[in-house]
Amino acid sequence: MNTLVAQRKRNTLGTIGRNWVLVFLVLEFGYFAILTRGFASLNIVQMILFYGTEAFLLATAELFVIITGGIDLSVGYVLGFATVISSKLMVVFASRGLSPLGAIVTSILITLCVGLIPGFVNGVLVAKLRVPPFIATFSMLGVCQGVSELLMQGIPAKNLPPLAGTIGNGHFLYIVPGSGISFMQRPDVARGVRVIEIIPNAVVFALVFIAIFAFILTKTRFGQHIYAIGGNIDAASRAGIDVKKHIIGVYMISSFFASLAGIIYVMKYITGKADAGAASLLDAIAAVVIGGASMFGGSGTVWRTILGCLVIATLETGLRMRGTPTFDKYILVGVILIFTVVIERFFPDFKR
Amino acid sequence: MPRPQMPHDTPTPFVQTRTGKLLGRHWALFFLLGMMAIFAFTGPGFFEVVNFQNIIHLATISILLAVAETFVIITGGIDLSVGFVMGLSSTLAARIMVTLGSTGMGEPMLIVLGTLAGLLVAFIPGFISGTLVARFKVPPFIATLGMWGICNGITLHLCDGFLPIAGLPSVLPRLGNGYLFYIHKGQSFTLFKKPDYIPDERVRELIRLVPFSFILIAAVVLVFWYILHKSKFGQHTYAIGGNIDAAIRAGIDVDRHLVKIYMLSAFLAGLAGVFNVFQTGIGNYTTFSSMYELFAVAAVVIGGASLLGGKGRIVGSMVGVLVLAVLKNGLAISGVQPFVRYIAVGVLLTLAVIIDQLFPDLF
Amino acid sequence: MGYIIETRGITKRFGGLTAVDNVSMGVNAGEVVAILGDNGAGKSTLIKMISGVHKPDEGAILLDGKPMKLESPMDALANGIETIYQDLALAENLNVSSNIFLGREKTKRSLGMFNVLDHEYMQQESRSVLDRLEIEIPSLKNTIRTLSGGQRQAVAISRSIYWQAKVLIMDEPTAALGIAEQKKVLDLVKSLKTQGIGIIIISHQMYDVFEVADRIIVMRRGQNVATRLVSETTPDEIVGLIVGSETVKR
C-alpha cells in the first residue's frame, strides 16, 4: 500500500519532471503577468504567437533534421532567400497585370518549389556524398546568402501588392461585440468601435503546416523511419529503410519550412532581404533542444519544440514589455539552453 | 554517426598514385597557389607585396580564431562561441579603457589594464564551456551555443545596445596598424614609426613592411604549433579526439584536458578581441551576420581537419584561412561582386570535404 | 530431404586475400549448425555472403534446392534469410514493437486517405510472437534503451521469427550477456529449432555450441576443414581442428 502511494508520488513527480518546460512556460508567463500590467491578455498572447511564427516554422524545420542526428545551419538564409524570391516575384507578377491575389498565390507556389532546392542539395551532399551536415548546410548558407544578395542588388523589393500586408497582418476572425463576426476580413466599422481580433492569419497558416508535419512525424511510416535513422542508422538500413532517400527528404522538409517562414516574413513586413533570418538560427536550435530533442538524434517532438519556441517568444515579448534591453534575451536563452541539458544529466527521469 | 565502410575492393586508381596522394593531401595548398596564379592575371595589383601584407593583416583575427578552433575540433568538439567571446573581450577592454580614462589615468596604464581585462575575461566563458562539456557531458555544440548567447547578451550590455565603444586612446590604432619598417624611397628608413616629416595624408608614399600584426600571428602560430605538435598536451589532444575511451584508459585526465582546451580556445578568441580594439580603435560587438565561428570552422576543415575529431594541423588551418582570405581579396580586386564570395566559399567548403572523403586513409 | 540453405563451392576474394575458399555446406530445416574457427578463418565473410552483404566471386547459394541471386541484404530478407548481428541492429530510441516491425510497419487507412501507423495491431502481433517464444518483456511500449542485453537479443530474435524466417543466422548471440541471460537465449534457440527453422550460429563459446548445435563446421584459412555431428565429437577434438593440430587424425 505504502509502496503504491510512493510509486504514484514518483509518477506524479516524473510527469511534472518530463513536462518541466510546460511548467517553466507557465511560471514564466505568470512572472511577466504579475510584473507587467496588461500582459495577461488575449492581445499579448496573440502578439507572442504572431511574432513567433517564423521561429515556430524554423524550429520545426530544424527538428526534422535534428531527429536524424543532423543539423541544418542554412535555415536562416533559406528564409532570407525565400523572402527575396517571393517579394521579387510578387512585384514582377503584379506589374505584369496579374491580380494582386493571383500574383501573391503564384509567387508563393513558385517560392515553395524553388525553396526545396537548397534542401535537396543539402540532402544529397549529406546522404550521398557523406559531407558532414554541419559543413554541407553551412556551405548552403553561404550560397543562399550570395544568391539572395545577387538577386537583390542591395535594393529590397518595393511596391508589393498591398494585399500581401493585409493578409499577412490580418486576423482569422473578427468580432464586433454586439454586431457580428466576420472571417478573414476586417469589418467596416466606425472609428473607435472595438473590434476583437482573433488569431492572426500568419499563425493559422503556420500552424496548419506544422500540424500536418507533426502528423507525418508521429503517425506515418516516414516519421517512424526518421526516428529509426536517428536512433541507429545501421539498424535502419539493415531493416530495409532507404536511409539516403529519407535523409534527402528530411533536408527538403527543412528548407520547405524555412521557405514558408520566408513567405510569412514577406507577408508580415512587406519586404524581403537576404539576412531576414540571420539571427534566428540560435533561437531555432535552442527551441528544439529546450523542447527535449537530443543533438545526437532519435528524439524530439513537434509539440515540445513549439513549447520551446514559446518559452523564447514569451521571454522576448515579456522583456520588451518590461522595457528591459531585449539583448537580455540572448543571455537567458543561453542559460535556459544549458540548463535544459544539465537538468537531464542530473535527473535522467526527466528525460522526455 | 559511424562512417559507412568503404568498399575495399573498389579502389579509386588516381587517388592511389603518388601524384594523387600528394595532391590529395595538400590540395588546399595547391588550390591556394592556383587561385593566386589566376588572380595575378585578373586582379591589377593583386600580386604585390603590399597586397599580400594586407591580406594577412586583415586575416589576423581569422587566424587566431582558426588556431583556437583547431584545438577544439581535434578533440572532436566544436566551439561556436569564439566570435562572441571575441566581441566580449573587445568591448570589455574598450569599456575599461574609457571608464578608467575618465579618471585621468595615464594612457599606457589604461591600455595595459584594458588589454589584461580583455584577455582575462575570456577565460570565464572558456572555463564554463569546458566544464559543461567535460564534467556535465553537455554536447559541445550546445554548451558553446549557450555561451554564444550569454556572451552576446553581456557584450550588448557593455556597449549599451548596438553602439560600438569609441573614445579610446588614439595611439591604439597606430599600434595595431603599425609597421616594423618604413622606407621612404631614396630618402629615409625608420623602424616602428613613420618618419616625422611625412604627414598622415602622404603616408601612402612610404613603403611599409612587416605589420605588427605579423609578429602577433607569428608568435601565436609558433607557440600553438609547438603545443599541438611537439608537446605532451598536443599529443593528448589528438588522443582524446581519436579515441576518448583509450585516452581515459591510458590515464589521461580527459576532463581536465577538455576544460583546458576550451579555455585555450576562449583565450585566443579574447586575444582576437583585444587585437580588434587595437586594429580598429573602437570596441566592437560581434554582429550576427559576421559568422566568425562558422568561418573559423570552415577554415579548419579546408585545412584538413575532421569534425569527427582526431585530425587537423595548425599549418593546415593557416592554409585554410588563407584560402578564404585570398579568395575574398582576389575576387574583390578582380571586380567580382562581393556576394559571389559567399557562394564561392560555400562551394569550396563542400568540395574540401568531398575531396577529403576520396582519400580516406591519407590523413 | 535436401538442405533448406546450401552453399556450393563459394569463394570470396578481397584483393589478393581469399577470405572464403570453395566452401560447401548446408543446413537442414530444424537444425542448428555452428560455424567455428579462429579469428580470420572466414566465418564472418561466409555468413555475410549468405545474408547478401557480400557477393560471392564463385559458387552458388541455394535456398530449398534452388539457386538464388542475392544482390543486397534486402534480397536475403525477402527470401526469409534473417541475420542477427552482434550489435543486434535495434533502434534504441524506439519501443519493442516498433523495432519488431522496423522497416515493415503495418499501416491502416485513416479518414479514408492517409496511411497511418497501426500501433495497436503491431503491439498485439509483437505480444503474440513474444508469447509464442515465451519471452518476458514487461511493456512493449518501453524503449529498447531500458531493456537488458538478453531482452534485446530476444527482441532481435522475435523480429526475425515474426517475419517468417526460414533461415536464421546468429553472430555471437551470447557474447555480451550474463550467465543467466546466456541460458535464456540458448533455450530460445532450442525452441526455434522445434519450429523448423534452419539456424546458423557463429560462436566462440564452446559450451554454447555443444549445448544447442546439432552439427559443427570448422573453418580454417577460408576453408571448410571438417564437419562433425555434435553427438560424435568432443570439445577437445574441435579445438584441435580449429587450431589445426588434429587434421591428420581420422
Image (tube, helix red, strand yellow):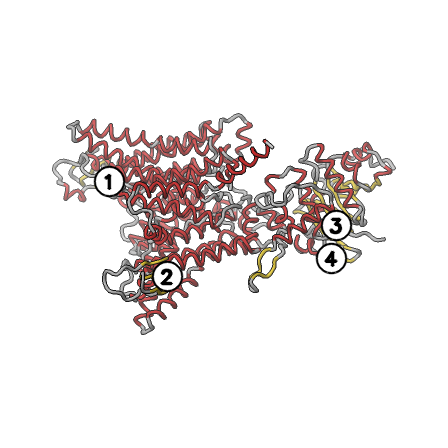
Q: Mark 2 sits on what residue?
A: A172
The Cα atoms of the two marked residues, 3 and 4, are separated by 14 Å
Kind of residue at badge 1: Asp
- Residue C207 is drawn in which quadrant? top right
Gap in Å between the C-alphas at discs 2 and 1?
39 Å
Label 2 neighbour load within 10 Å: few <14, some 14-19, many 20+: many
Name the front one of labels 3 and 4.
Answer: 3
- Compared to residue C41, the image places residue B235 above or below, namely above
Q: For the residues carrying marks 2 and 1, which lies nearer the camera in this image?
A: 2
Q: Image quadrant for the N terminus of chain A?
A: top right
Of label 3 and label 4, which has the lower sequence position?
A: 4
Q: Amino acid at mark 3?
A: Val
Label 4 marks a residue whose chain is C
Quickly name the residue at label 3: C167
Mark 1 lies on residue = B160
- Compared across the picture, whether B155 is left or right of A16 comes to left
Q: Do the dots labelled 2 and 1 sit on one chain?
A: no
Q: Nearer the viewer, residue B285 or A166?
A: A166
The chain carrying label 2 is: A
- Inter-mark Cα distance, 4 to 2: 62 Å
* Labels 4, 2: front one: 2
Residue under disc 3 on the same chain as residue under disc 2 = no
Mark 4 residue crowding within 10 angstroms, few (<14) / some (14–19) / many (20+): some
